[in-house]
Image (cartoon, rainbow, N blue to C red):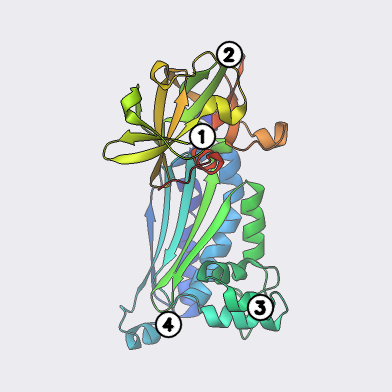
Amino acid sequence: MGMRMLPISFVFGRFGRTVHDLCSKLGKQVELHLVGEHTELDKTVIEQIGDPLMHLIRNSMDHGFETPAQRTAAGKPETGVLLLNAYHKGGNVFIEICDDGRGLDRELLIAKALEKGLISAETAATMSDQDAYQLIMQAGFSTATELSEVSGRGVGMDVVRQNIEALNGVVLIRSEQGVGTNITIRLPLTLAIMDGQLLSVGQDTFVVPVVSIVESLQVSDTMVRKVAGSGELLHYRQEYLPILRLHHAFGLETDTRELNRGVVVVLDVDGKRLAVFVDSIFGQQQVAVKSLESNFQRVQGVMGATILGDGSIALILDPTSLAQMNAISIH
């Protein structure tokens, strides 16, 4: 399994020359900062992530950064900073491309989209900032007033989106005009190796990413509050967490139905917390994550599957999707 993993420095390493060459061609001054170069990805992802990142860097150099004179006039240092950052978080791999350039102009993006008929006037009137920024990922969309050797033909960003989605990933864009843009690529660990905690529910075994676990505990009846309907809340460290019974969520048979007889695993879900009730927990091990969609079909609450040492198949739980399945919203 370890032989499949490669540090992302294999990809990041080639961009220093790219940024240097584009600075000369465009008359700009930009420093490239690399963080998280030792973050490991499956070699299949490494092979496919290079081109999308190259598109994003070229776009940032051409459209994002101002010339030294423009930066000085705006009260910024003459030299801009382009940051590439990679890290693992909550069972996903994140790659960030951040620049301190001019940022995205929301009104210009919407005006161009209206002009090209990509959105209706009604949609434009109610569009959020996030949705407006995502317009740059539409096929044929470009705000460039003239073509350049670097970009401006309306191809590239939609290709980036397609390539990332082919890896079951998501592209998120945050921007502030005059301050800069942050483009985050979130990739699931469907082609990677992860540390997993094994859980049992009835006759079934599940795996949850260790990085998502805050704490595992046995609860008493006094720690649980019933809410309207069939919902339950766990009184945990001065806050109330929604409880998701895994056997209910997946329709499994189990003899462990009283909360004080099983184990509650507290998961971190994008900064919020969810309590998941299971029969028991046992052992941790590294597991190779296999895509469930390509081998079977998409299952809510599950990010993939793995084959355990005894040849049995265990589903790998997706904390974010589990939270969405839960009847009680997380507060």
Q: Residue at x 61, y 74 (%)?
A: 151
Residue denoted by label 3: 122
Going from N to C along the chain, the mark reached first, 3 or 2, is: 3
Q: Is residue 134 above or below residue 323?
A: below
Q: CA distance from mark 1 to mark 4?
A: 60 Å
- Circles 2 and 1, Cβ within 8 Å, touching? The answer is no
Label 4 sits on a secondary structure element that is loop
Q: CA distance from mark 4 to mark 3?
A: 37 Å
Residue 80: mark in rendering: none
Going from N to C along the chain, the mark reached first, 4 or 3, is: 4
Q: Position of residue 321 (x, y in %)?
A: 55, 41
Q: Residue at x 60, y 70 (%)?
A: 136
Q: Position of residue 30 (x, y in %)?
A: 39, 71
Left or right, residue 51 beside residue 64: right
Q: Nearer the viewer, mark 2 or mark 1?
A: 1
Label 1 sits on a secondary structure element that is loop
Q: Residue at x 58, y 74 (%)?
A: 126
Label 3 sits on a secondary structure element that is helix
Left or right, residue 257 beside residue 31: right
Q: Is residue 6 above or below residue 263?
A: below
Residue denoted by label 1: 230
**Three-letter amino acid code at disc 1?**
Ser
Residue 67: mark in rendering: 4
**Three-letter amino acid code at disc 3?**
Glu
Residue 203: mark in rendering: 2
- Circles 3 and 2, Cβ within 8 Å, touching? The answer is no
Q: Nearer the viewer, mark 4 or mark 3?
A: 3
Q: Is residue 114 visible?
A: yes
Q: Nearer the viewer, residue 184 or 317?
A: 317
Left or right, residue 256 beside residue 69: right
